[in-house]
Image: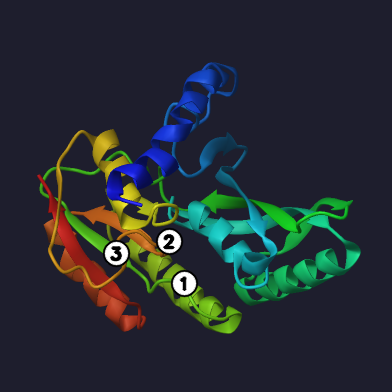
Amino acid sequence: MNNKELIKKHVESILWLRDELLEMDSMAKPLMGIEDWDDSVAVEFPGSKLVISVDGPYAKRLVMKSALIHASTDVVVKGAKPLFALDTVIGTEADIREMVQSLKRQALAMEIPILGGNTFFEETEPRCSLTVVGELLTKEPIRDSTAKKGDVLLLIGEPLWGEQQGRIEKAKIMFRTWFDIIKEAEVHAAKDVTKGGIVSTVHEMEKKSGLEFRLDKNIPLSMTRNLDNFLAAVSTDDYEQIEAIAKKNGCAIYKIGSIE
């Protein structure tokens, strides 16, 4: 699949949903909603601001590795700390038991408790969807549309590939580093690199910002595969500080381009 096909499949094919649901924003008046068409929704809540994301349905293969982590990246990258999750699972009892046990291991390791959900026993392909609720740590959610001219483009964190324990350890490092970064420096825009990889993620951020993203040659990661790390646009003034934070935490960081 070439780049245009990837973008059409993962970005453009669902834009009609935005138009269909846009009027809902006027009912709820979210901080970040349908109009933003971002990775998560952000809403005012007494005493705090909540960031919420729904992801899935995940195939059992991914549930057994890191589905809760993948669902959480949409919340973390917006500048929020996950508080809890809810699951929806379907499949045979044996499949559901395995998936829930795996989700429990991920929840304990990442300190994101699963507090409820819905279970449907059926002789069908086992699947799981997850809702993650987080509390915003930044003043405003870090949108994917607010990159600035002159920014540096960074990838933060290793790709979350491999077996479950390895994915958990990589995610812990990436989340910890990200929370340190947003506490000490300003991130202008960010998005997790999922469906369609860097190609689709850059396309979406570029279109929303109205700026030109220039990528370096020989980026040492797949351009089209889900990485589940974070693509961030930051000022050149903040770059060195962010790089230092990443190195201090033992977190991978890649400078992959600039914004004009």
Q: Is residue 121 left or right of residue 202?
A: right
Q: CA distance from mark 1 to mark 2?
A: 9 Å
At x 14%, y 42%, the residue is: 212
The residue lying at 13 percent from left, 43 percent from top is 149
Q: Which residue is mark 1?
A: 160
Mark 3: which secondary structure? strand
Image quarter hosting the C terminus: top left
Q: Are marks 1 and 2 in contact (CB under 8 Å)?
A: no
- The location of residue 196, given as percent across then percent down, is 39, 52
Q: Where is residue 109 shown, x and y percent of the image? A: 64, 77
Q: Which residue is mark 2?
A: 226
Of badges 1 and 2, nearer the viewer stands: 2
The disc, 3 or 2, on the residue closer to the chain's N-terminal end is: 3
Q: Judge depth for marks 3 and 2 and give the one in front.
A: 2
Residue flagged by tag 1: what amino acid is it? Leu
Q: Which residue is mark 3?
A: 155
| Quarter assignment of residue 144 | top left
For discs 1 and 3, the disc positioned in front in the rendered view: 1
Q: Is residue 189 visible?
A: no
Q: Amino acid at mark 3?
A: Leu
- As shown in the figure, which amino acid type bears the numbered disc 2? Asn
Element under disc 1: loop
